[in-house]
Image (cartoon, helix red, strand yellow):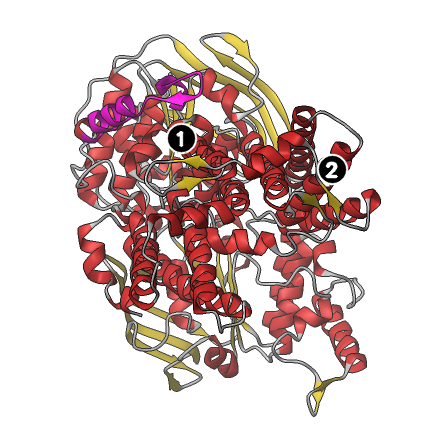
């Protein structure tokens, strides 16, 4: 029997209302690179949070055995002491501090409480050499790119004498060159005897680097494959990730599709934080009246960035491309322009960007379309109340009244408020970003019904979703986005989860 | 203390958003009753009107501050702008300018200062604290370029306004300044509640990012509130000039803090998005009543006012903490 450095058995983790992990097993052999694959929401990150003590012992069921000992981590400090270090997708570095300060943060090279800066910088320099980063240890982290910051994180892990290194989507934000360098580094670490667990959406990377792969789906372990023994191809991984039956969760609809309503051509957006990185790369797509179109893509593919850059340039820099409404070219520079041209965008993060949580339902509904309820700057409160009541009835917003504070509603009802707000602006084109995220099944059905109704009224709807079954159940056509490029356009009849997943994971060749 | 322990019951009867204002109202009533029991000649309507008369300038300044704080900002320059307004009026009146021209000019100066600070805050994305701190030093410094001494005001219009009392029947009377301050409150309350500008103020303070994605004019709103605050400070300065009939560079030192205290005691969240002008009025009244009680007491030094204000502020910040924690729990 090969020696396992880590065994997690029977891990179950529930959040109020959802079971994120159900009896998950994971066994990692010493000195291997072990990949974990799964759709968004399959439970990969939750599993790693259980392992690293973010969710302390007692908040989950199951057993963790590391280096032959049973572990009950009370927090990240415990797991780090045992030699497990996790590097999250959102890097946890202090941008204002130097590389060396970051590496030894919380673990300072000190003698009797006084920091030994010579030793700090010297040892940091040695670690940087080991990860192949040619930077002065005194350089401020904010001054180096994301790729290099990733290496600093790894150097930080090495400084803690890591035995098991966990990387959550390490290459999601990196360009090809930095990704290749990172993967080489991981191979080097493996040869030094450090075990790595890597969570990745990029299946070509997984097949290239991993020694074994565990596939999660819907919070369960599906299988663990040995790359050397089994014949593992990207297709094999995809069928493991999506193999699930579609049930009857979608209201019926007979589409009646009309003329072209909205089109973008050759849309390119650069990242505002990393100069020169294209987040959306020459994307073109088109929506017709009465049509529900899906936009599928994995995390980091650029879906939200595409939508927000179209919606009044609320994301990105150096945006180029053309927008057509009803076949005529239009210019959208601000959110106000977008609303005026009949375009609405409901954000994926409704609590932060979509609602004023401390205000009531009626004022949230009227916020974007207040112009129509006001005359020369004075708001007609009676009309506002009436409109809000009408939406409360037609959208079935469950609240004692339109004076209720939005922050206290459930996710589904909050989403109905967001949709009401945009419908009030009388849009022709609605872009709905993750419209059912964090919403329970019953309310999802209601949201789908509302989306169908919007399409029936002749509006064009673009639905962005991480849930493939949702796109298959809802949409007439689905575009796939991968690394900022549209990689496919699949009509309803031809759309299967496997086909979409294949297109979504297709890298840039 | 009773006000805090009594909260859960109160919360069930009235919407939560009105609770802080109601707590302040209860506090005000309690103080008034306590004063009436303890001192003769206290429990009269004129006592309350006198609070308005003596604090008219603070009320107007606090109205402007309420706009700013509702957007989640802060304006530290108001006290200095008040002093600058008194200095500019006193020196121009001494030079023989007509009173109404002076008033108009002072108001324009105040609004322009506010506009400038608002523009800097928005377009350069600098924290309001820093920008208005700079504005505070600037306005205070400008006072001394006019004169380092106090300048008396002898203009007929100003002295007439200072001495007029408007009889309200009975033994009650108000000064023109107090009437002006009450009119300002009414206009401002109407603006906050019934205009798109008012809505944008609440929306910006509630969640600036959401407001941007809803297409609300966040830039215009933020600049507008600082302009309003500057205008209110200048108007407050004029009322202060009516009250003191002089201009002096050292007047209204620390008034920005009184104004902030009044707004916070009135139940407005310092993080923005929630609060009412009625609360601000009550906040000013509570501060004024503390001063009145201390002057009735006679033996206490006026510094006790500060001690009571300090204690009250602590109590209200704790209260807000309890509420915001409560609503955050409710959101999940």
Mark 1 or mark 2, which has the lower sequence index? Answer: 2
* Residue A314 place in picture, x, y as percent: 54, 33
SS state under label 1: helix
* Residue A281 place in picture, x, y as percent: 59, 31
Q: Can you say which quadrant of the picture contains the C terminus of chain A?
A: top right
In the rendered view, tell whether residue B332 sits above or below residue B214. below
Residue plotted at (45% across, 59% down) = B292
Mark 1, chain letter? B
Q: Are marks 1 and 2 in contact (CB under 8 Å)?
A: no
Query: Does the image show residue B324?
Result: yes
Q: Can you say which quadrant of the picture contains the N terminus of chain A?
A: bottom left
Residue plotted at (32% across, 56% down) = B43
Q: Residues within 10 Å of mark 2 (few under 14, many from 20)?
A: many
* Mark linked to residue A67: none
Q: Main secondary structure of the magenta part?
A: helix
Q: Separation of disc 1 and disc 2 at Cα?
A: 30 Å
Is residue A372 covered in magenta? yes
* Residue A453 place in picture, x, y as percent: 23, 22
The residue that disc 2 covers is B88
Query: Does the image show residue A315?
Result: no
């Amino acid at each position: 029997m090969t020696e396992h450095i880590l065994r997690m058995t029977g891990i179950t983790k529930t959040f109020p209302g959802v079971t994120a992990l159900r009896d998950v097993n994971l066994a990692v052999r010493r000195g291997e690179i072990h990949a974990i694959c799964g759709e968004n929401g399959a439970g990969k990150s939750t599993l790693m949070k259980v392992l690293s003590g973010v969710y302390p012992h007692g908040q989950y069921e199951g057993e963790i055995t590391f280096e032959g000992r049973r572990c009950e981590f009370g927090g990240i400090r415990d797991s780090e002491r045992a030699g497990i270090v996790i590097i999250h997708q959102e890097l946890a570095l202090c941008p204002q501090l130097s590389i060396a300060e970051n590496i030894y943060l919380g673990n300072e090279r000190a003698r009797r409480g006084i920091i030994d800066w010579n030793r700090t910088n010297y040892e940091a320099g040695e670690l940087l050499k080991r990860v192949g980063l040619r930077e002065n240890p005194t350089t401020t982290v904010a001054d180096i790119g994301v790729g290099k910051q990733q290496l600093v994180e790894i150097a930080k892990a090495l400084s803690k004498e890591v035995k098991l290194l966990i990387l959550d989507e390490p290459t999601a934000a990196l360009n090809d060159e930095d990704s290749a360098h990172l993967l080489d580094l991981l191979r080097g670490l493996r040869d030094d005897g450090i075990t790595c667990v890597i969570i990745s959406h990029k299946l070509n990377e997984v097949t290239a680097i991993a020694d074994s792969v565990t596939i999660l789906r819907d919070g369960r372990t599906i299988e663990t494959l040995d790359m050397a023994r089994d014949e593992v191809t990207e297709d094999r991984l995809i069928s493991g990730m999506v193999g699930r039956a579609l049930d009857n969760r979608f209201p019926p609809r007979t589409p009646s599709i009309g003329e072209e309503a909205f089109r973008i051509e050759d849309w390119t957006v650069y990242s505002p934080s990393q100069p020169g990185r294209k987040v959306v790369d020459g994307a073109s797509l088109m929506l017709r009246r009465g049509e529900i179109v899906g936009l599928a893509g994995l995390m980091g593919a650029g879906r939200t960035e595409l939508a927000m850059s179209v919606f009044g340039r609320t994301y990105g820099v150096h945006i180029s491309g053309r927008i057509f409404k009803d076949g005529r070219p239009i210019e959208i520079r601000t959110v106000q322009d977008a609303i005026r041209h009949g375009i609405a965008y409901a954000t994926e993060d409704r609590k932060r960007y979509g609602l004023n949580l401390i205000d009531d339902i009626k004022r949230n509904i009227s916020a974007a379309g207040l112009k129509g309820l006001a005359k020369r700057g004075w708001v007609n409160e009676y009309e506002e109340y009436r409109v809000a009541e009408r939406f409360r009835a037609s959208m079935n917003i469950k609240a004692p009244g339109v004076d209720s504070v939005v922050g206290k509603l459930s996710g589904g009802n909050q989403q109905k408020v967001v949709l009401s707000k945009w419908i009030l602006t009388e849009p022709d084109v609605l872009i709905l970003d993750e419209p059912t995220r964090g919403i329970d099944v019953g309310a999802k059905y209601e949201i789908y019904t509302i989306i169908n109704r919007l399409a029936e009224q002749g509006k064009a709807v673009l639905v962005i979703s991480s849930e493939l079954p949702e796109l298959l159940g809802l949409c007439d056509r689905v575009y796939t986005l991968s690394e900022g490029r549209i990689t496919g356009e699949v009509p309803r009849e031809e759309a299967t989860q496997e086909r979409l997943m294949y297109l979504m994971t297709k890298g840039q060749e | 203390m009773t006000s805090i322990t009594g909260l859960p019951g109160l919360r069930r009867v009235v919407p939560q958003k009105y609770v802080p204002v109601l707590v302040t109202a209860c506090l005000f009533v309690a103080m008034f009753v306590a004063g009436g029991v303890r001192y003769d000649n206290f429990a009269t309507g004129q006592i309350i009107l006198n609070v308005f008369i003596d604090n008219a300038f603070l009320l107007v300044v606090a109205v402007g501050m309420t706009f700013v704080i509702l957007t989640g900002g802060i304006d530290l320059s108001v006290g200095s702008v008040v002093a600058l307004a008194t200095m500019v009026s006193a020196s121009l009146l001494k030079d023989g300018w007509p009173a109404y021209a002076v008033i108009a000019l002072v108001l324009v100066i105040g609004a322009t200062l506010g506009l400038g600070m608002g523009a800097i805050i928005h377009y350069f994305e600098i924290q309001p604290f820093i920008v208005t701190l700079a504005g505070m030093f600037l306005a205070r410094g400008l006072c001394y370029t006019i004169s380092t001494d106090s300048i008396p005001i002898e203009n007929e219009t100003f002295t007439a306004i200072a001495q007029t009392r408007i009889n309200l029947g009975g033994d009650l009377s108000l000064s023109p300044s107090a009437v002006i301050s009450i009119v300002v409150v009414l206009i401002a309350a109407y603006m906050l509640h019934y205009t798109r500008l008012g809505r944008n103020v609440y929306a910006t303070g509630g969640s600036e990012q959401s407001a941007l994605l809803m297409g609300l004019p966040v830039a215009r709103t933020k600049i507008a509130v600082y302009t309003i605050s500057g205008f209110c400070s200048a108007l407050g300065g004029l009322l202060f000039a009516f009250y003191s009939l002089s201009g002096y560079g050292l007047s209204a030192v620390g008034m920005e803090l009184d104004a902030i205290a009044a707004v916070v005691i009135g139940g407005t969240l310092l993080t923005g998005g929630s609060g009412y002008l009625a609360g601000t009025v009550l906040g000013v009244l509570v501060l004024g009543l503390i001063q009145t009680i201390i002057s009735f007491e006679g033996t206490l030094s006026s510094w006790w006012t500060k001690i009571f204000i300090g204690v009250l502020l602590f109590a209200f910040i704790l209260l807000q903490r309890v509420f915001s924690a409560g609503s955050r729990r409710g959101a999940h």
